[in-house]
Image (cartoon, rainbow, N blue to C red):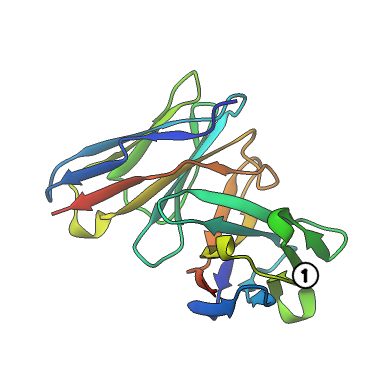
Amino acid sequence: AQSVTQPDIHITVSEGASLELRCNYSYGATPYLFWYVQSPGQGLQLLLKYFSGDTLVQGIKGFEAEFKRSQSSFNLRKPSVHWSDAAEYFCAVGAIVRYNNNDMRFGAGTRLTVKP
Amino acid sequence: ETGVTQSPTHLIKTRGQQVTLRCSSQSGHNTVSWYQQALGQGPQFIFQYYREEENGRGNFPPRFSGLQFPNYSSELNVNALELDDSALYLCASSPGGGVRNTQYFGPGTRLTVL
């Protein structure tokens, strides 16, 4: 079964600084990869996803992620962090168990704090 | 367009009781997935309903059951509640069951079991 590891439990960056959140996955076939963001008291919002093709994917709110098959990684980046980016970030990997079934596995999350 | 809604927002139950959580899917979506998110953890997949049929299940015991109605809204039922069932329960709707279909999450129901 697929699995996801997010090595950093908590990251603090200064507003305006760049950000990279790490994600490593384990899956035997081509993975379907996602990044979600969760603000306090809210559900999850999709930032971006990778299925195939260009390994650098652009998402909403200025985020991007790069799929590196050789490193089994899908790291999330943002060149300049805003205070409103403070939230919990989840990486997820999806697998096709059988037709029309969506089996998503999430990492434990990385909490982002933004310093003024 | 109305997003995914869940009710109730918060719920407190005692061990051994039963609980029903509700989810209204986004317009045009025929698939609902349920997740359990324990404190400080990522969501864990419970099961998915596609066109009123259970279409996949995670590693959860049978006391976790569900329903999907003709309007594609859904219920999650948990019997014989245990303390470890305390969590945020999220539902997500999508326009199909496949992994390529983006899931849209509701705000969740916070369940506390005492």
Task: Indicate left or right for B109 with A107 as reference.
Answer: left
Image coordinates of residue A103 in percent, x first then y, are 56, 52
Above or below B91: residue A23: below
Q: Nearer the viewer, residue B94 or B63?
A: B94
Per the image, label 1 sits on a secondary structure element best described as strand
**Residue located 53% across and 79% down the image:** A12
Q: Is residue B74 left or right of residue A79?
A: left
Q: Horizontal and vertical percent for residue B71? A: 50, 19
Q: Residues within 10 Å of mark 1 (few under 14, many from 20)?
A: some
**Farthest residue in the right direction?**
A54
**Residue drawn 87% across the image and 62% down it:** A54
Q: Residue at x 63, y 56 (%)?
A: A94
Q: Looking at the image, which residue sits at the far front? A: A116
Q: Chain of mark 1?
A: A
Is any atom of residue B44 visible in this view?
Answer: yes
Looking at the picture, how far across and down is residue B56, in whole percent?
51, 44
What quarter of the picture does the N terminus of chain A occupy?
A: bottom right
The amino acid type of the residue labelled 1 equals Glu
- The location of residue B48, given as percent across then percent down, is 50, 41
Q: Which residue is mark 1?
A: A66
Say above or below: B51 vs B17: above
Which quadrant of the figure contains the C terminus of chain A? Answer: bottom right
Q: Residue at x 70, y 75 (%)?
A: A73
